[in-house]
Image (tube, rainbow, N blue to C red):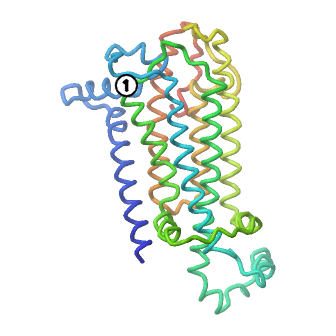
C-alpha cells in the first residue's frame, strides 16, 4: 500500500510540475489584450524559448542571460543518466518480482483463447489472479516504454555530437536551458512513475543479483498489441526525425558560418519544423505504448505539444521574415492545422 501511495504522490507532483510548465505557454498563445499583460507575456516567453537563429532575432534577449546552444548536449546527458537509472531499477524489479508474466502452463491456452474469443480464459483462477497479473503487465509496460525512451535520448545524444554543427554565435536563453534540464529529468520520471516507488522500496533490501537473461526479455514479448503499435509509431517518428536532423545538419557545411538556407526534403515539403512534428509522433508512440493509463504521461505529452508548437510557430515566422521566397504553403508544425 505504501508503494501505491508513493506512486500516486509522485504522479501528482509530476502533474503539478507539467501544468506549471504548460500554463505560461498556453497563456502566451491566447489572444490576451496588451493592457492585461498579454503582449509582455508573449515577448517574455519568446525570449525564454528562443535559441539558435531565433535568439538573435529577439530584441529582448541579452547575452547575459544566454548560454551556448551546444549546451543542448547537457539535456541528453541528463536524459540518458535519468532514463538508464530508472530502466535498470524497474527492469530488475520486474525480473525479480513480476515473472513469469503469464504462467507457463497456461500461456498457450491463454493465447488460443484470445485468438478464438473463447471464454475459457475467464476461469475462477483467472479472475482471482487478474489484478496481480494486470499489475505485472503495468510494470513490464513501463520497462518497454523506458527502453524506447532510452533509444530516443541515446540517439539525440549522438546527433548532438555528430550531426548538428552549432554556430559559435548560436545561443539559447538560460530559462530555455533550465526548462530542457527539467524536461529530461521529468519525462522519464513520468514514464516510470506508476511503479517507481515500489521498485525502489524492493531494491533497497536486495543483494541477490543472480539473473537469467531469458527472463529479462521473454515478458516483453508477451505484452499486448498496444505496446507494439506504440513501438511502430515511435520508430516511424524516429526515422523521420533522423532524416530531418540530417538535412538540418547538412545545411551548414562550414561550421563557422552563420549563413542559413531554406531546408528541403522529407517532411520539410509540408511544415517548417518537421523534426518537431516527428517529436510529436515519437511521444505519441510512447503514450500509446504506455497504455495511456497514467495521467502524468498525458501531461508529459500535452507539454510536448504546447512547447514544440509554440517554438515551431516562432521558427516559422522567422523563416517567413528571413526568406522572401519561402514557400507559403508550408505550415509551422502540423499540416493543415498550424
When asked about the image quadrant of residue 94, the answer is: bottom right
Counting from the top left corner in percent of width and height, residue 84 is at 58, 50
Q: How many marks?
A: 1
Counting from the top left corner in percent of width and height, residue 57 is at 41, 13
The answer to which of 314 and 119 lies nearer the viewer is: 314
Mark 1: give few (<14), some (14-19) or many (20+) Cα within 10 Å.
many
Position of residue 98 relative to residue 65, above or below, is below
At 71% across and 37% down in the image, what residue appears? 239
Circle 1 sits in a helix, a strand or a loop, which is it?
Answer: helix
When asked about the image quadrant of residue 106, the answer is: bottom right
Q: Where, quadrant-wise, is the N terminus in this rendering?
A: bottom left
Counting from the top left corner in percent of width and height, residue 201 is at 47, 70
The answer to which of 285 and 242 lies nearer the viewer is: 242
Left or right for 239, reference 290:
right
Left or right for 223, reference 171:
right
When asked about the image quadrant of residue 89, the answer is: bottom right
Position of residue 12 relative to residue 181, above or below, is below
At 45% across and 48% down in the image, what residue appears? 186
The answer to which of 133 and 97 lies nearer the viewer is: 97
Counting from the top left corner in percent of width and height, residue 247 is at 68, 22
Residue occupied by mark 1: 46
Amino acid at each position: 500500500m505504501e508503494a501505491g501511495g508513493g506512486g500516486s504522490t509522485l504522479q501528482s507532483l509530476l502533474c503539478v510540475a507539467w501544468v506549471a510548465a504548460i500554463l505560461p505557454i498556453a497563456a502566451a498563445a491566447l489572444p490576451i489584450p496588451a493592457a492585461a499583460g498579454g503582449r509582455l507575456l508573449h515577448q517574455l516567453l519568446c525570449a525564454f524559448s528562443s535559441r539558435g537563429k531565433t535568439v538573435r532575432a529577439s530584441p529582448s534577449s541579452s547575452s547575459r542571460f544566454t548560454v551556448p546552444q551546444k549546451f543542448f548536449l547537457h539535456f541528453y546527458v541528463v536524459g540518458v543518466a535519468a532514463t538508464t537509472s530508472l530502466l535498470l531499477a524497474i527492469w530488475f524489479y520486474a525480473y525479480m518480482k513480476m515473472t513469469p508474466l503469464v504462467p507457463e502452463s497456461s500461456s498457450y491456452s491463454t493465447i488460443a483463447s484470445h485468438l478464438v474469443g473463447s471464454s475459457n480464459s475467464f476461469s475462477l483462477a483467472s479472475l482471482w489472479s487478474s489484478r496481480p497479473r494486470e499489475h505485472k503487465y503495468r510494470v513490464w509496460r513501463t520497462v518497454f516504454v523506458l527502453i524506447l525512451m532510452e533509444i530516443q535520448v541515446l540517439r539525440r545524444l549522438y546527433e548532438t555530437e555528430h550531426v548538428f554543427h552549432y554556430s559559435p554565435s548560436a545561443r539559447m536563453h538560460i530559462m530555455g536551458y533550465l526548462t530542457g534540464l527539467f524536461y529530461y529529468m521529468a519525462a522519464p520520471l513520468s514514464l516510470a512513475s506508476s511503479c517507481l516507488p515500489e521498485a525502489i522500496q524492493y531494491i533497497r533490501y536486495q543483494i541477490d543479483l543472480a539473473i537469467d537473461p531469458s527472463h529479462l526479455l521473454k515478458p516483453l514479448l508477451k505484452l499486448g498489441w498496444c505496446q507494439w503499435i506504440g513501438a511502430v509509431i515511435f520508430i516511424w517518428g524516429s526515422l523521420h526525425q533522423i532524416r530531418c536532423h540530417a538535412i538540418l545538419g547538412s545545411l551548414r557545411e562550414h561550421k563557422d558560418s552563420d549563413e542559413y538556407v531554406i531546408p528541403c526534403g522529407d517532411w520539410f515539403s509540408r511544415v517548417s519544423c518537421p523534426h518537431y512534428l516527428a517529436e510529436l509522433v515519437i511521444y505519441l508512440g510512447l503514450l500509446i505504448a504506455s497504455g495511456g493509463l497514467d495521467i502524468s504521461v498525458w501531461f508529459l505529452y500535452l507539454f510536448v505539444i504546447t512547447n514544440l508548437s509554440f517554438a515551431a510557430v516562432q521558427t516559422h515566422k522567422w523563416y517567413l521574415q528571413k526568406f522572401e521566397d519561402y514557400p507559403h504553403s508550408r505550415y509551422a508544425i502540423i499540416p493543415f492545422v498550424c
